[in-house]
Image: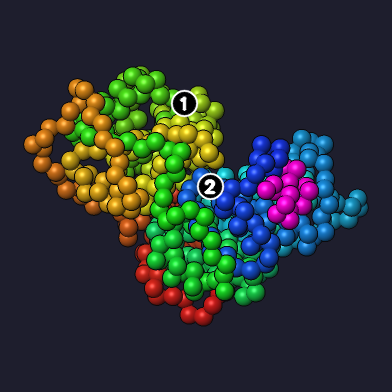
Amino acid sequence: MSFSNLGLSDAIVRAVTERGYTEPTPIQLQAIPAVLSGGDLLAGAQTGTGKTAGFTLPILHLLSEAKGDRTVDSHASDGRPSSNRPAEKIGQPRKRSPIRALILTPTRELAAQVEESVREYGKYLKLTSMTIFGGVGMNPQVQRLKGSVDILVATPGRLLDHVQQGTVDLSRIEILVLDEADRMLDMGFIRDIRRILALLPKQRQNLLFSATFSNDIKAFASSLLNQPTMIEAERRHLTADTVAQKVYPVDREQKRQLLTHLIKEHNWFQVLVFTRTKHGADRLVKQLMDDNIPSLAIHGNKSQAARTRALAKFKDASLQVLVATDIAARGIDISDLPHVVNFELPNVPEDYVHRIGRTGRAGAVGEAVSLVCVDELKLLADIERLIKQPLPREIVPGFEPNPHAKPEPIQNGQRGQASRGKRPDRAPSRSPQAAPQPRTARHADGERSGARSPVSRRPSGRH
């Protein structure tokens, strides 16, 4: 079946085809008609299966049909996509249109990725979009919000900053999307999300997309969604068949040397390496650079400009290794990314699924390896229990682990973003333009968050 058979407009199908996509993925086959029907949706699929297009394509169709848009030229006279330049009649001031769709994401990188998809898929439509997130100045966002914005992609904390300053109006939202909802709940955004929900019209379409269907997600969905269609395109917590997984047992003191050996021995390039903490990421980058392996780190303490530059270098294959924490890696979407390395296993087994889902995307083949010391054997067992399969082990000659080594406990201070109930990549951060905020935590990712409250305590009433 093609995208044109799903009821999407010719303009959207044309844009999708130009990006090289001809057949919808399983999640898209189910989600697109469900969203087009106008009802609420609870959708889950493993990462890399096309969830973003599953909601952006039908949203673009619904908004453009209601607006009466017609196909437009792909580029305006200044070379920018015309979707960012709505037609204006000469001699008449442009009317400020209401924000009609709100897409919430847990991280900056994911927000940027989603909004890029909105622009690409909607480039032949007269719809406008923008992102707002922390880590950058508010003033350019304020100025952009004064213009026409149909689709807003935002992270919760910065969105509430704008709400407090009165620079954004959410009173006419028609469609709400919570993307990677499971991660937002894990990161402690439940309080911020509830505050945002209270600002939206009661009559709206709600779409909740999640890589996993945890009990917390189902409980939250029951409080938010009204008789939703439920879609789960893949079996729960199943890792993609296109990803070859392997475990390298090694002593903790030999991990860095083994990583260097694997990269050089197999001539790996475009290697995404995960660590638990920001300091661990910076330390590993320094060690790899000492080994003449070009590397950069991406995490919540890095400025947005530094994160953007590192990600751009990694995407264009001019950077060999990108070392990331879990929170910063959300939104890294690179076609044909060949290698993902768990330098340290995550404390939350679901994060393993998210990590290795950065490779083997859209049917491409990828490799995910984990360097596991004696301290992490229980974490490994938890992961294997979750994905319902044992991971093959391979001992590299010269890096044999000491069979008599005793495990050392992983201290809370080392767990970083991997630990449930601990807010990831957290550090004090406040936009200088922002109004005084309540005493809530704020992620170094630029996002405010309250303590993770149990999802079973549902909001009163239905938002």
Answer with left or right where residue 88 lies relative to residue 458.
Answer: right
Q: Circle 2 is placed at which residue position?
A: 49
Q: Residue at x 57, y 70 (%)?
A: 228
Residue at coordinates 49% horizontally, 74% vertically from top-left?
A: 223
Q: Secondary structure at mark 2?
A: loop
**Front residue (pair 269, 27):** 27
Q: Is residue 350 left or right of residue 225?
A: left
Task: Identify which residue, 288 or 302, lies in the foreground.
Answer: 288
Outermost residue on the right side: it is 91
Q: Which residues are magenta?
A: 1-15
Residue drawn where x is 67% and y is 38% of the image: 19
For badge 2, the amino acid type reads Thr
Q: Is residue 423 visible?
A: yes
Residue drawn where x is 31% and y is 32% of the image: 284
Can residue 301 be seen here? The reply is: no
- Image quarter where the C terminus lies is bottom right
Residue 11 lies in the magenta stretch: yes
Disc 1 marks a residue whose amino acid type is Leu
